[in-house]
């Protein structure tokens, strides 16, 4: 090779130059504070919309700090009366529960020079990390309230409560009679189901009947463990396989072969919320839509009736501050610099989670050898 010819070897930096530091300077974006702030706001705006779209079918958002509702027992029929009779007096009694309210948050911060010279990828990565942590915190608390029978003391005599849980608690609520059913103090919506003799179909029937006998039916949904998806698919003709909307004609292939049932549901919904549409189950209480989550441990299921987005009859109550509303919001801490007037961006959310009035829309089950109920650890 001729001497003094330039090749790629000549790209090596000479002594005295640090390639890492040069790369850092070259890759900086020089973003303004407003651009940095917009990146963070966009990330949490998406998260707020995802949470509302994903969980609104099961919640009711309210500024109320407590609920009061009818306590149960037997009912007397309306008696016949004449124009000379005075109708008998009757009065009900009520129970109630409280909803806690807490502020949670994380911060994104640094010097003005850091933000000036930072790569936007670092800012986006930080915002997304905080958003994922916020999603995890909310979803864990949301599902934990549905799946656990624990009462939480608030103050000296107040309680946040689960759905109806039988005796043993501090607020021993008895559901009102409905449809010819009279409920007793031991009525419980937390069911241990013995896997030695029963299966996932039996558990779903038990939970759906718990909900339906109180008048909640028509749009039953089950949140189940993703680890149990294969077991639900193996339920045979009672499992409804989801299909794409484009499929309109199914040829079974024969009288005794091919698919029997199909549900016309979009595939792949709710991925951002960690819930995936699995299909449906045809049981004694009707059709139950099945949705899986990796946050739910194996063997557990939670059935409720959805009345639509943000309906008071849905099972879970989400308390908000009336001046803030639902969702993550930005609080800025100033440092009085002209280019970067904020030294920290605090991302906060203010909410509490409990159950809605009535406490009957929702039933949890645990399929396990021996059939003893144990509160799960939502991950």
Image (cartoon, helix red, strand yellow):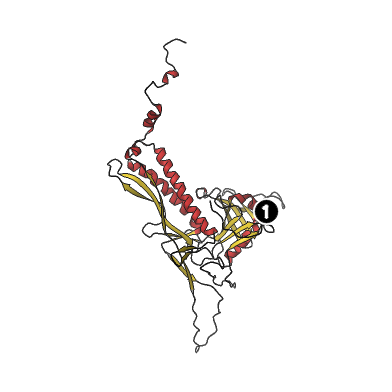
Q: Position of residue 14 (x, y in %)?
A: 39, 20
Q: Quadrant of residue 180?
A: bottom right
Most distant residue in the top direction: 2
Q: Position of residue 284 (x, y in %)?
A: 64, 62
The residue nearer to you, when weighing 180 against 210, is: 210
Q: Position of residue 367 (x, y in %)?
A: 63, 57
Q: What residue sits 33% from the left and 48% below the top?
A: 332
> Does 47 sit above or below residue 190?
above
> Does 141 sit above or below residue 166?
above
Is residue 20 something one can see in this rendering? yes
Q: Is residue 256 left or right of residue 80?
A: right
Q: Residues within 10 Å of mark 1 (few under 14, many from 20)?
A: few
Count of marks overlaid on the render? 1
Q: Is residue 285 left or right of residue 70?
A: right
Q: Position of residue 4 (x, y in %)?
A: 41, 11
Q: Is residue 163 left or right of residue 12?
A: right
Q: What residue sits 61% from the left and 58% below the top?
A: 366
Residue assigned mark 1: 236
Badge 1 marks a residue whose secondary structure is: helix
Most distant residue in the bottom direction: 84
Q: Is residue 128 left or right of residue 189?
A: left
> Does 134 sit above or below residue 22?
below
Q: Quadrant of residue 127?
A: top left
Is residue 249 something one can see in this rendering? no
The residue nearer to you, when weighing 253 against 117, is: 117
The residue nearer to you, when weighing 283 against 366, is: 366
């Amino acid at each position: 090779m001729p001497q003094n010819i330039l090749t790629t070897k000549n790209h090596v930096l000479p002594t005295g130059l640090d390639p890492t530091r040069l790369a850092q300077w070259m890759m900086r974006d020089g973003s303004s504070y407003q651009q940095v702030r917009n990146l963070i706001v966009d990330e949490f705006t998406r998260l707020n919309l995802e949470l509302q779209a994903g969980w609104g079918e099961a919640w009711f958002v309210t500024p109320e700090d407590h609920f009061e509702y009818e306590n149960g027992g037997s009912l007397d029929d309306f008696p016949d009366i004449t124009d000379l009779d005075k109708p008998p007096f009757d009065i009900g009694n009520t129970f109630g529960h409280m909803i806690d309210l807490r502020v949670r948050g994380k911060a994104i911060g640094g010097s003005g020079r850091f933000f000036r010279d930072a790569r936007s990828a670092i800012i986006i990565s930080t915002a997304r990390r905080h958003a994922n942590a916020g999603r995890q915190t909310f979803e864990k608390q949301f599902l934990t309230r549905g799946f656990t029978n624990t009462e939480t003391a608030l103050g000296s005599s107040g309680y946040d409560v689960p759905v109806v849980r039988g005796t043993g608690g501090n607020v021993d609520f008895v559901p009102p009679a409905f449809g010819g059913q009279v409920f007793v103090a031991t009525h419980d919506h937390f069911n241990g189901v013995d896997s030695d003799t029963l299966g996932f179909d039996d558990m779903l029937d038990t939970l759906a009947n718990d909900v339906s006998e109180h008048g909640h039916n028509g749009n039953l949904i089950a949140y189940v463990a993703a680890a149990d998806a294969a077991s639900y698919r193996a339920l045979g003709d009672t499992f409804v396989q989801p299909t794409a909307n484009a499929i309109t004609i199914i040829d079974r292939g024969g009288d005794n072969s091919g698919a029997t049932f199909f549900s016309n549901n979009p595939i792949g919904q709710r991925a951002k919320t960690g819930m995936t549409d699995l299909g449906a189950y045809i049981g004694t209480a009707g059709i139950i839509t099945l949705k899986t989550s990796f946050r739910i441990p194996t063997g557990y299921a939670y059935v409720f009736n959805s009345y639509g987005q943000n309906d008071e009859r849905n099972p879970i109550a989400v308390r908000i501050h009336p001046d803030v509303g639902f969702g993550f919001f930005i609080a800025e801490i100033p440092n009085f610099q002209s280019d970067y007037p904020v030294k920290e961006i605090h991302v906060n959310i203010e909410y509490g989670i409990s159950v809605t009035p009535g406490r009957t829309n929702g039933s949890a089950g645990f399929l396990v050898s021996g059939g003893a109920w144990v509160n799960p650890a939502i991950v």
